[in-house]
Image (cartoon, rainbow, N blue to C red):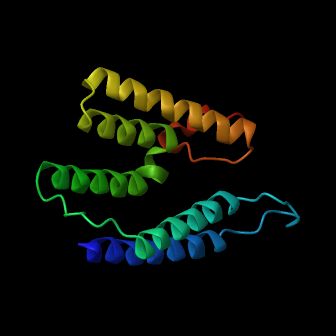
Amino acid sequence: MTFNDRICGILLIVLAVAYGWGASQFPVPFGGSEAVGPETFPYLLSAVLVLSSLYMIVRPDPDNAWPWSRTGVELIIAVVVLLLYTALLQPLGFIISTTLAVGTLCWRMGATLAKAYMTGAAAGVVVFLVFNYALGLALPLGVLSFLEAG
């Protein structure tokens, strides 16, 4: 069933192009001459997704049945979690949204609730600190905006 991989590859290329176009719509930073701007990481992700998708189209897996059993349900749940994550990123902020999304996905993969959400919280805080302080790229704080200095 190489047809499934090819359809998925084409859909992922469409997603990658839309993602790259969305990154091109970011406002230009003051001065505009920075080598690394807010669009750099999305551009890299978009390029990797295009290359991976092209590989799926050119060299599909010869035996890839769609997982309509429990695995298919888990994939649908993962997509719903990621869509909710995107919708809640601004209002709740990066740390809380990431805690909920990563925690839920870890739980669905078999971790206990406590371990899953502790992992989500650690991931949210660590990635937030790396982006805000090491990379200088601001992530939304949402309901935690009272933590902003200033």
Nearest the camera: 48 or 2?
A: 2
Q: Residue furthest left?
A: 69
Nearest the camera: 131 or 142?
A: 131
Residue 58 in which image quadrant = bottom left
Identified at 11% across, 53% down, the residue is 69
Q: Is residue 95 above or below residue 111?
A: below
> Where in the figure is residue 9, as x and y percent of width and height?
40, 73
Q: Is residue 38 above or below residue 20?
A: above
Query: Going by the image, does 70 lie left or right of 104?
Result: left
Q: Is residue 145 above or below residue 11?
A: above
Q: Residue furthest front?
A: 62
Identified at 66% across, 42% down, the residue is 131
Residue 60 in which image quadrant = bottom left
> Where in the figure is residue 99, as x and y percent of width and height?
41, 35
Identified at 57% across, 66% down, the residue is 46
Q: Quadrant of the C terminus?
A: top right
Q: Quadrant of the N terminus?
A: bottom left
Identified at 31% across, 40% down, the residue is 105
> Where in the figure is residue 114, as x and y percent of width and height?
30, 21
Q: Is residue 85 above or below residue 63?
A: above
